[in-house]
Amino acid sequence: MSATAVEGAQSPVMRTPRGFGVRTATHFKGVVGATLVAAVLVLALVAPWVSSNPEASDLALRLRPPVWTGKGVPGRVLGTDQLGRDLWSRIAYGGRVSLLVSVCTVLLAGSVGIALGLVAGYYGGAWDRVIGGLVDIQMAFPFLLLAVAIVSAMGPGIRNVILVLALYGWVVYCRLVRGQMLALREKEFVLAARAIGCRDGRILWHHLLPSVIPAVLVISTFQVGQMIIAESALSFLGLGVQPPTPTWGGIVNEGRAYVSSAWWVTTFPGFMLMLTVIGVGFVGDWLREVFDPRLRD
């Protein structure tokens, strides 16, 4: 039996699901979610061209309402905040930071978690016990306490926020991949690869890793939404990205003292946060139905 034949025995796992295009076009939540996510991505990418400097302040224009209320300032579509900064510009640029942090966090946490999950599930024994112990410790450690400890030791900033969230999120990938490995390591294509002398590295990289990609892709989509919320929560608590760099959570935090007199300062960034998380969740639901045969019609 050749290596090509062994790879062929595993290939159905990675085939595009039958009716992929049809289910994409007819899945209402998937279309809505993809549209929302695409809109937020486009806004983040074109922010320098459709908005002004988000840090430019003008105290003479502080807490002005949206322009359509009749009391706003021309050019300040969504109004201004407590320092007279354009709220539209801050939301557009804040989306760039929130998306950057969430995507980088998912990539870092996913890489670490997948690697450890592959090792723990494939080799078992001492590897599984050690990595399982790390998972138990991580899950028992309160996230907020971890965030405070790291930020206190290393200082706030985008890099440290990504590190905190990655330390929080890698466990999900590790447990998922480990469970998949326990079921896959005794499959026929793995036994055949061992029989022809394939090394463990080749089996893990060329045979087992592709088999878990669909499940990892689905969980990563949901993780992006969760990390956006987590980043916003840290920024809201003052533990995340520091002013004057705008983030959605930071804008909400800065405007919470003016909720009764300037509702727009917290409402619009909160609304963008809600729409983005809903859109990512809808896309995750669609991917789960695409890759999970038990959910297909």
Image (tube, grey):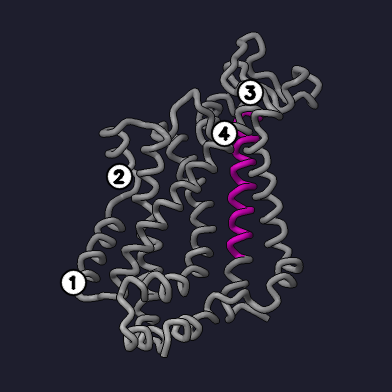
Q: Which tag is nearer the camera, tag 2 or tag 3? A: 2
Q: Give the alpha-carbon distance from disc 3 to disc 4, as whole Å.
A: 23 Å
**Dominant secondary structure, magenta:** helix
Amino acid type of the residue that numbered disc 3 sits on in the rendered structure: Ser
Q: Which tag is nearer the camera, tag 4 or tag 2? A: 4
Magenta-drawn stretch contains 212:
no
Going from the N terminus, do you reach mark 3 or mark 4 first?
A: 4
Numbered disc 3: secondary structure: loop
Amino acid type of the residue that numbered disc 1 sits on in the rendered structure: Ala
Identify which residue is drawn at 71% across, 56% down. Answer: 32
Amino acid type of the residue that numbered disc 2 sits on in the rendered structure: Leu
Numbered disc 4: secondary structure: helix
What residue is disc 1 on? Answer: 126
What residue is disc 2 on? Answer: 146
Pointer 2 local density, CA inside 10 Å: few below 14, some 14–19, many at least 20: some
Numbered disc 1: secondary structure: helix
Mark number, residue 94: 4
Identify which residue is drawn at 61% across, 19% down. Answer: 85
Going from the N terminus, do you reach mark 4 or mark 2 first?
A: 4
Pointer 4 local density, CA inside 10 Å: few below 14, some 14–19, many at least 20: many
Quadrant of the rendering where the C terminus is positioned: bottom right
What residue is disc 3 on? Answer: 261
Per the rendered image, the range of residues in magenta is 262-285
